[in-house]
Image (cartoon, rainbow, N blue to C red):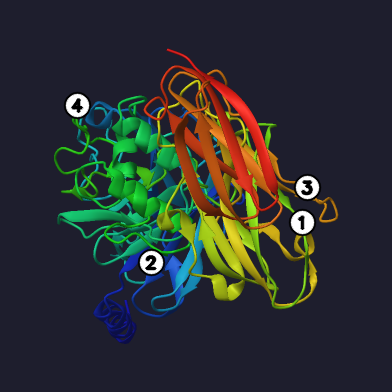
Amino acid sequence: MNKKFQLLLYLAFGFFYSYAQNADFTLKYSSSNNQYEVYVKADTDFQRFFVGGGSQISIVLPAEIENQRLLVETIEGGPWLDNSQIYAPEACKGCDFHGIASNGSMISLKKDEEKLLFTFTIPTVEEEKSVRLFENNKDPQSFDKGMAGGDFNNFFACALTLKDAYRKNYGNEKVVTGIIKTWSGFEVDLVNISNGVLTSTTDEAGKYKLEVLENSSSKIIPEKNTFPLNGLNTLDIIKIRQHILNNQPFNQPEQWIAADVNKSGTISVADMAEIRQLILGNTTHFKNNTSWRFVDVTYSFDKEDPLKGTAAEFATISQLAEGEFVNFTAIKIGDVDDSAIPNSIISTEAKNSDKVLTLTLDDTQLKTGDTYTATFVTENFNTLQGYQLSLQSDALSIEKVKSQFGGNNNFGLTQLNKGLFSTSWNRTAPLKEEVPVTASLFQVTFKAQKDGLLSELLTLTQQPTSVEAYDLEGNIMDIELKFNPFYEQKPFELYQNEPNPFKSETTIGFYLPEDSEIELVFRDESGRVLKTIKEEKNAGFNSLKFDEKDFARGLIFYQLDTKFGSQNRKMLRLE
């Protein structure tokens, strides 16, 4: 060989060899066309890089996939062909190996930029599988059992230097994957997954992928702290109360976690109170908790007390094996019936009852500056377990709220400046046969900011508290307002007590056209006065409750005196 040519060739080899000439590979999956993509990235520029013949990139598939050649489509540096396969060798029985080799081609590489070499599909598989690139230093070698001399080491050579430019599989080193679902099996999206360095987010199918540092331990921590009101309603309060009373105990350990809203390690009325204030719009977040919590699916709860011990709300990955899955169960705090909307592809469920709770109130013609007390009455109180609602009016200011069944904690008054009022109530006394059918649930005193009919100025709204009621079976019902025509001037009336006869409790109702002082007098058959009640009462329906301590057995006559006149009725107290 000419010495001058030898010198030039030596200098050329030395020039190329002086560069690191390392190339990294990665494998990606495209869900849009169900194909895998193999990329190369060099750490220096090559205007004319000749992929030498015999260059090979090997793919590892789960052994359960049908034994068949991969369908390879060449993009650069090929033609690439699936030339050799070994299925489930003894050295790795859960793996199939495919060597995709090239006969050589000229390409250009730019420093730190990806170049797509080829794509491939698995003929009989229509979803993403745990497919990865072969790792030269970890996967079985040609002399290992069952490999039959097959050399699947990745090799990417530049024919100009005869140097192996392969270094590692970037993006394919240590990847943890998993899925996050609620305890009833629905996928949760937009969960942030972090290992303290890198983050990922679950998709609509609840899936995530997250890189972790090579040869190190790493904590996988899921987090989601948005929309705390998602899935919460007064029915959750009812169910927590039933659990506390041991009437209907929780049957899922995740329900315990959801019910422990304040993270005290116990379930109590304090948790119920915090849920109610969130429902009413009086608060915007949990004081000592996040909106969602996540528990490693491999964690075993204590059977007697799932709150005992520390739930595994992260996973520690040591020397992560390729293809390892870390799944979590998502628990929406406060949502003990798992009704939260977990992802963007699931719509809000409709009410599960065709029943409607009707709240009746008297309509009236209001003038600016007028003050009027509206009494909200139901004729289905004996079948009602609870309700929640919001009222809206830009033309009425709320002066006062009152209920014989609840206190200030049952009302949301923080958004009155926006014309919004909300209430949430559930039955706390044990159900008895003597529960009255008709009852005045609450009263609201309005001051008119402009002229108009009350029915035109007041409407139900879904914010801040959604509108729904619950029957005794826990079915969710809608709520409607029914206004009695204002021109229908109802006269003063004393109603028959309900129930009658009665043993332990009874309720006497009466209607007042206007506010009035009342005097209710009870007498026995001889005319002797047994009890007298004198109070100021508001216009509309009113009621008073009595029990066996108020009256002895026998026939009792009662008379109601008001500025509108007097009326009499009688009732019977049984043994």
Residue 31, position in %: x, y? 56, 50
Q: Which residue is mark 2?
A: 159
Callout 3 amino acid: Lys
Q: Nearer the viewer, mark 1 or mark 2?
A: 1
Callout 2 amino acid: Ala
Instruction: Please report the residue visible at 63 percent of the width from the left and 41 percent of the height from the top.
Output: 510
Callout 4 amino acid: Glu
The tag earlier along the polypeptide, 1 or 3, is: 1
Callout 1 amino acid: Asp
Left or right of residue 559: residue 14: left
The tag earlier along the polypeptide, 4 or 2, is: 2
Instruction: Please report the residue visible at 63 percent of the width from the left and 33 percent of the height from the top.
Output: 380
Q: Which residue is mark 3?
A: 490
Asked whether 531 or 346 is in front, the reply is 531
Asked whether 438 or 193 is in front, the reply is 438
Compared with 48, 215 (above or below) is above
Q: Badge 4 local density, few (<14 within 10 Å), some, or many (20+)?
A: few
Label pair 4/2, CB-CB below 8 angstroms: no
How far apart in space, not on screen, are marks 4 and 2 (Cα)? Answer: 69 Å
Asked whether 126 or 326 is in front, the reply is 326
The tag earlier along the polypeptide, 1 or 2, is: 2
Asked whether 118 or 366 is in front, the reply is 366
Q: Which residue is mark 4?
A: 304
The tag earlier along the polypeptide, 3 or 4, is: 4
The tag earlier along the polypeptide, 4 or 1, is: 4
Q: Secondary structure at mark 3?
A: loop
Compared with 509, 207 (above or below) is below
Residue 500, position in %: x, y? 57, 21
Q: Which residue is mark 1?
A: 363
